[in-house]
Image: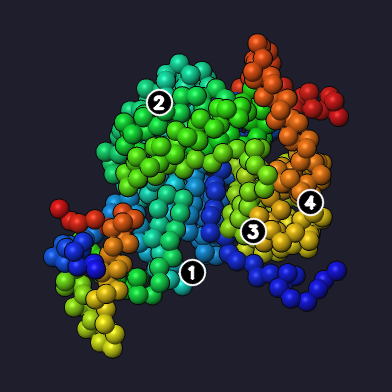
Amino acid sequence: MATAGSETNLEIKPPLWLLAELTYRCPLQCPYCSNPVEIAKYKDELSTADWVRVMQQARKMGAAQLGFSGGEPLVRPDLEELIQEARNLGFYTNLITSSVGMDEARIKRFKEAGLDHIQISFQASNEELNNYLGGSKSFQHKKDMARIVKEYEYPMVLNIVIHRKNIDQIRDILDMTVELNADYVELASTQYYGWSRINVDQLLPTREQLANAEKVALEYQQRLKGKSKIIYVVPDYFETRPKACMNGWGSIFLTIAPDGTALPCHEAGQLPIEFPNVRDHGIDWIWNESGGFNHFRGFDWMKEPCRSCPEKYKDFGGCRCQAFMMTGDAANADPVCDKSPYHQDLVDDVNRIEKMAKSEKPDEQPIIFRNMRNSKDIMKKETAEA
Amino acid sequence: MNETTIDRNAIPEVAPTFRFQWEEAQDCYVILYPEGMVKLSNSAGEIMKRIDGQTSINTLISNLQETFPETSVEGDVLDFMEVAYGNGWIRNKS
């Protein structure tokens, strides 16, 4: 029922954040990748001219932050050109990278093109685990690149995705970020979407591990105050209230996948919703008019327990993708919320994984690394099962 | 209260790890940094745009006072400087 008032006539604000997933190609194979399992499907990447048009249109609407991401954005030979164009348009430009494919000459060219910030990911604080998780000998290279990034006076974010295999080394990881002079450190708990979801049994930390990591992170946050900002977010599987995912559907974030699909978040492609493509439509129409971007805007789409919940203005019912993955209906409450009738299923699953993690054979199931061959195999299997 | 902490002869500049610019869509000046943005109030924007790595805080105060003769700007400037130094948006030119 359409009631008069603010709930049905929500003003659509322009996007602030444009995430440009330039490619899903990547020299690393991290099993916790947030990219979709179907990465091998995305062969038809947008051209340089497509990206320039998207950036112009999004900037005109008011987007100020631009992330070049992937896959590995360094794979694109037109990256320098895109940075230059983005900077000319007035974007604050963020390069989100593994640093594999970078050297000093390229860092210098990025600076000249006007790149504002470089974020480098590390898999771990020691060579062996880093290279194992990434599936490549990248550890020393990453450290070299981090030093050069600082020499060129970029603000540097070091991002370490945290999970059961590296969480116990959190102190070493933080020491490494101090040694490398990071301005910001993101201890990003693995979120179980896309590729990482298929490895959740091997990656989800135990409650003890989490409690210890939180304690250490807090200690470093206090110690490094004013020097380096440490951001640590615990995985929401252990919470009883959901995150305000993307600050609300279609409210701030605009992601463009390598094939031009426009999404309200980089995981939304898995939802049974039709999303527009920048090859067919302008960003203005996509953001304001398209069915995909209006699907979960506002509050009218909500079911109980969200519909009558006073906290809906704060968390927007949580994450649509999580609701879809765990309940089969993206309009349900995020099962992280203990008001959701599916919350107990999530708790049971976390308990099951914890029990396995503490068993004598925690790694009976092998980790599935993120690469094109595995992607093809999984897609083949899915087709066969369907 | 601020007199003790802010050196008025210092010449501040925008730190290389931050960017200051006008945002048409927001209708205000903003500070941009990795994956974030702070919107500035009108007065903060007026102060910030005079921080150019050549002007001392003292001179900045008198310039601003000339532009806005009706209000006393000194307290606002010193308060803002404290916030701006504290957040690392500006640093003293060495």
Q: Are marks 4 and 3 on the same chain?
A: yes
- What residue does disc 2 label? A172
**Subunit ID for the residue under disc 3:** A
In the picture as drawn, the residue positioned furthest to the top comes out as A360
- Is the residue B39 above or below the residue A214 in the image? below
- What residue does disc 1 label? B26
Cα separation, mark 4 vs mark 2, equals 41 Å
Image quarter for residue A10? bottom right
Residues under numbered marks 4 and 1 in contact, where contact means CB atoms less than 8 Å apart = no
Q: Which mark is residue A200?
A: none
Q: Amino acid at mark 3?
A: Lys
Instruction: Locate residue B74, reporting x and y percent.
Output: 24, 76
Of the image marks 4 and 3, the number of the one nearer the N terminus? 3
Q: Which mark is residue A314?
A: 3
Look at the image and tell me in which quarter the N terminus of chain A lies. bottom right
In the picture as drawn, the residue positioned furthest to the bottom comes out as B70
- What residue does disc 4 label? A331
